[in-house]
Amino acid sequence: MRKIQITLIALLVSVTSQVYAQPQFKALLFTKTAGWHHTSINEGVDGLRQLSKRHQFDLVWQEDANYFNPQYLQQFDVIIFLSTTGDILNDEQQAAMEDFIQSGKGFVGIHAASDTEYEWPWFKQLVGRMFKIHPRNQTAKLTVLDAGFPGMERMPAKFWWTDEWYEFGEETSENLNYLLSIDESTYEPEAQWGDNIGKGMGDFHPLAWYQEFDGGRSFYTALGHMAETYSDKMFLEHIYGGIFWAATGKGIE
């Protein structure tokens, strides 16, 4: 009788553990590049894997665009583009991603995700602004614009950060809600790549934002150029806040 009781208790503990170990949601991490390849991608993947363990969600990493089909994508709640560049999806794959967002799911773009698919109008709207140019890596002062978004509460109201500061083109969506900006008086924004000249964005230079778009949700942050960034807890929680909201629609105060 005692053996039966012990067995039943062990079974109950095992079942309970399995219930509590269920992932909150499932994310597809995509890192294909057709332009500049960021060497920090590997550290980014490692950092996101740690996030998935810390916050109990499933993370699948792919670089093959052939996985962008309706049958494969339907298992996920959010797609993450980590420093993708260039034209990385064909027409059928683009259609599959559009259907994914339109079904009420989410997108997260990190750093060079805004340097991706310039000829795809829908994607440009999904991201919200496209990369134009950047100067050399520098330290600059950032300002939190909305501490009510998940992950932003961990950041000081103003803080110094070292990164690669993207200058962006005009808004490609009217729905953007801004989370973070940079003070251009605290660094040198000038840059020139041939005919491409950067002079900064002026008094308002956003770095992170979110929006509801085409039935789904989109979050973008320009931070994350440097490999060392992906071991920074504050930055990783900034990323997780975007993933959590994009995947679930929860967390905004």
Image: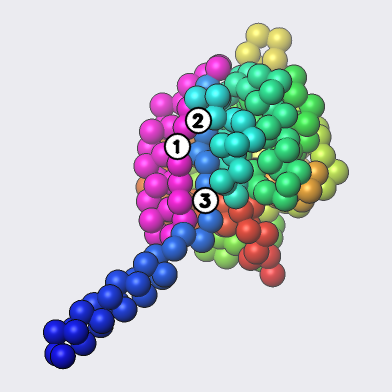
Mark 3 lies on residue: 26
Q: Answer whether residue 183 is visible to the viewer in this image.
A: no
Boundaries of the magenta span? 34-63
Q: Which mark is residue 61?
A: 1
Residue 61 is covered by the magenta coloring: yes
Q: Is residue 52 magenta?
A: yes
N-terminal label among 2 and 3: 3
Q: Quadrant of residue 81?
A: top right
Tell me: residue 125, above or below residue 143: above
The residue tagged 2 is 31
Task: Return the x and y of residue 192 as percentages of the image width and height.
Answer: 64, 16
Q: Is residue 10 left or right of residue 63?
A: left
Residue closer to the observer: 27 or 233: 27
Q: Are marks 2 and 3 in contact (CB under 8 Å)?
A: no
Q: Of label 3 and label 1, which has the lower sequence position? A: 3
Q: Residues within 10 Å of mark 2 (few under 14, many from 20)?
A: many
Location of residue 86 by image quarter:
top right
**Which secondary structure, mark 1?**
strand
Residue situated furthest top in the rendering: 194
* Image quarter in which the N terminus is found: bottom left
Residue at 19%, 84% in the rendered image: 4
**Pointer 1: residues within 10 angstroms few (<14), some, or many (20+)?**
some
The Cα–Cα distance between marks 2 and 1, rounded to whole angstroms, is: 8 Å
Q: Amino acid at mark 2?
A: Thr
The answer to whether the residue labelled 2 contacts the one labelled 1, judged by CB atoms less than 8 Å apart, is yes
Earlier along the polypeptide chain: callout 2 or callout 1?
2
Is 34 drawn above or below residue 109 in the view shown? above
Q: Is residue 43 left or right of residue 89?
A: left
Secondary structure of the residue carrying tag 2 is: loop
Q: CA distance from mark 2 to mark 3?
A: 17 Å
